[in-house]
Image (cartoon, coloured by chain):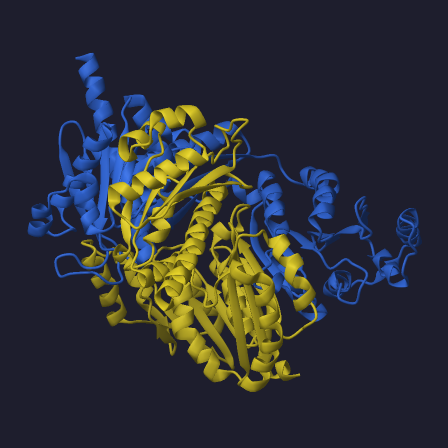
Chain colours: A blue, B yellow
Amino acid sequence: MPGAAFPNAEIIAVGSEMLTPQKVDTNSLFLTEQLNALGVEVVRKCVVGDDRERLAATIRVALESARILILTGGLGPTEDDVTRDATAAAVGLTQVFHQEIADAIEERFRLRGRKMAEINKRQANIIDGADVLPNDRGTAPGQWLVHDGVQIMLLPGPPSELKPMFTAECLPRLEALLPPQVIRTRFYRVSGMPESELDALIAPVYTKYLNPVTTILAAAGDIQVHLRARCTTCEEADAILCQVGPAIESLLGDRIYSYNGDPLEVVIGRQLRALGGTLSVAESATGGMLGARITSVAGSSEYFDGGFITYATAAKTKLIGVDPALIQAHGVVSEEVAKAMATGARERTGSTYALSVTGVAGPDGGTEAAPAGTMVIGFASPDAAEARRIRLPGDRTLVRQFAVQAALDLLRRRLTAAAKSSTIGATS
Amino acid sequence: MPGAAFPNAEIIAVGSEMLTPQKVDTNSLFLTEQLNALGVEVVRKCVVGDDRERLAATIRVALESARILILTGGLGPTEDDVTRDATAAAVGLTQVFHQEIADAIEERFRLRGRKMAEINKRQANIIDGADVLPNDRGTAPGQWLVHDGVQIMLLPGPPSELKPMFTAECLPRLEALLPPQVIRTRFYRVSGMPESELDALIAPVYTKYLNPVTTILAAAGDIQVHLRARCTTCEEADAILCQVGPAIESLLGDRIYSYNGDPLEVVIGRQLRALGGTLSVAESATGGMLGARITSVAGSSEYFDGGFITYATAAKTKLIGVDPALIQAHGVVSEEVAKAMATGARERTGSTYALSVTGVAGPDGGTEAAPAGTMVIGFASPDAAEARRIRLPGDRTLVRQFAVQAALDLLRRRLTAAAKSSTIGATS
């Protein structure tokens, strides 16, 4: 496995303020991006409060498995700033006072018309043998030391100091240490099946390979599959992707709706433009969420003719002419009503296609025929109207999100078919 | 200090996807908030990839110092889901297969008309001696075990599953374990001013007190102000809240729309019910988001008569009869068109009130008269129609969210006035 040559990294962010409900450690996101670009994977990251012993213990554990360890924050002048002391304790080294660093900090204060406080001298303590990483934006210098083959970096916490220091000082050193490599990816977005089913389908393929790495992410009826190949040459990376990619693609088939990360609303927008068709919607249970997804795409007015929010039963008749007798006979959550809604929206807007959603989002309002979570998606085209009944898991919000995804996916499949038959028409 | 008796907690989030540059572990923020409310401080948190050994090592270190350890994620059915195995290994226990859990998962699939994949059975493995925490929202049950005096929780990763499970199962158990303390809160939701302005207004009051703690949270035109008093008796807590609360309330005035956490869509629903009035909407720039917010409330069909998504210009004329000459004369993003949209929706649905939104969500489509971020909110009642132009910051999504919030807030203020005048009418 070519990936084995690349060392892994761990990141430890130091600071009690990042253990509150409001604060997130964003430095690790920047560092992860930079490390990934070098082919280095981050395998663990921690946030530790301003506690010397706990931080030293966390560093010791990281040193057992990481080849690169980055600590951020805790380099300030106060008692709370424990990174220097904890690191020195963890690696069993003393600190050396550097007069020239103290002078530089003092000069920095002087230039701003201030006097350096005595405690700032602490920032001139450097772990024995470590390289000093200069800090143009603040008083705390960074440190780089090598211990038992682990590259350890101590970087300041403020992003405005950390980012330039990492880019100017750490990046060139890391590049010189690491073997050259390339990363190639494939990316699929899939709808129409639960995560576990998808995994059962494609695991027999992807588990055979450590490279590329396959990741599956799922949210509200939308699944993303990532393949990431890491090799020393482009040819090698492309070659292994060409083994795994097509195998997964043929298993997933037309459930893949996007190869470039575009969401469904962008995909159907592109399809409608290509076909020169327009769309309208009639929404009951989703109350406007389908329209909101479609119009989240800038320029969607070119193919979206508008819609009706017919949440109350009376509105279905009043706004889009659904026959009350039909509702009486089949119930509001029925294939018949879904078709009548789509047809009504299509006629009133003059659109080529129309989607509709009627259902019981829950938690209340369910019946024996249509328990909470039941959704019926309607579709109308110049040729015909159809409807599909589905049963969705989750709470009210999730059920509504799933229904929107299912409606857009039904449209995608019908537009794909329409594009095929129009191509056949054109060539025959 | 009463806090000294309170045990500390650690949180470990499991999942390689949270070690990418894009993803942040947000579950730990929710858990930290919940634990803090119980008086428990989080002293370390980690994110570990899908690696059994590394996770087991991380758990072992946490067990050395934490009294409460929460693991999130990695409870899914696939090979990648390593939390069960790693925890069992770290505490030196085996896992026991629970047939009744497997049956419940199978039933869940059956209800959705699907067959359970064989791998889902893995989710029925429970660490020997652990309590099962039921999961209504997904297939993965949680687990709670006590090892060497440490309370260990295994919770599912999706926030929609984790949050209800923590609230329903973990919170009562933790409360029973922890020494008693009284927390009293006041909570305000505020609209109509930016966070910085609100902070400048109320900071002179709240900065005088360390207890209660005041927290301000802001999102898309919606600000939440929390006051949290932590004391040993109710009387003490109530007394300090009675000092700070009324002072903040009088500064914020009618910008406070909720004292109990209810969002705006619930507040206006209650107002409409009380007045016996109904509502309809006509949405251009928000494309259905306003209707989606209103119908996110179960039972909203009682007061919501429906709506129109008139995103394309032609739809404004076709669906709700906006005069093309009006659009020609004033432009689509104008007070005149917003009023005509609201009036049109009101007439076509027969609702008492109507809201409309027209605007430029951006990034393109702005003009000199209406640059990107310009939104015009229209309101129609039995008495008159009016419109308000606002200029909103942020990207397309944020601008649309702000506009929905502004529309609901305009409605709230008009309904408050209507309720007042009807009360005056009734008593005079």
Q: Is residue A208 visible?
A: no
Residue drawn 31% across the image and 67% down it:
B124
Based on the displayed image, in which of its 4 quarters is residue B10 positioned? bottom right
Q: Residue furthest front?
A: B428
- Identify which residue, B396 or B51, lies in the foreground: B396
- Identify which residue, B169 or B299, lies in the foreground: B299
Q: How many labels were placed on the picture?
A: 0
Identify the image quadrant of the N terminus of chain B. Answer: bottom right
In-image side of B161 versus A54 (left or right): left
In-image side of A217 versus A405 (left or right): right
In-image side of A116 versus A255 (left or right): right
- Which percent across, then down, holds residue B85? 42, 65
Residue drawn 58% across the image and 72% down it:
B245
Residue drawn 40% across the image and 23% down it:
B328
Based on the displayed image, in which of its 4 quarters is residue B273 positioned? bottom left
In-image side of B124 versus A129 (left or right): left
B353 vs A168: above or below: below
- Which percent across, then down, holds residue A217? 40, 48
- Which percent across, then down, holds residue A277? 27, 25
B33 vs A421: above or below: below
Identify the image quadrant of the C terminus of chain B. Answer: bottom left
- Which percent across, then down, holds residue B86? 46, 65
Q: Is residue A360 visible?
A: yes
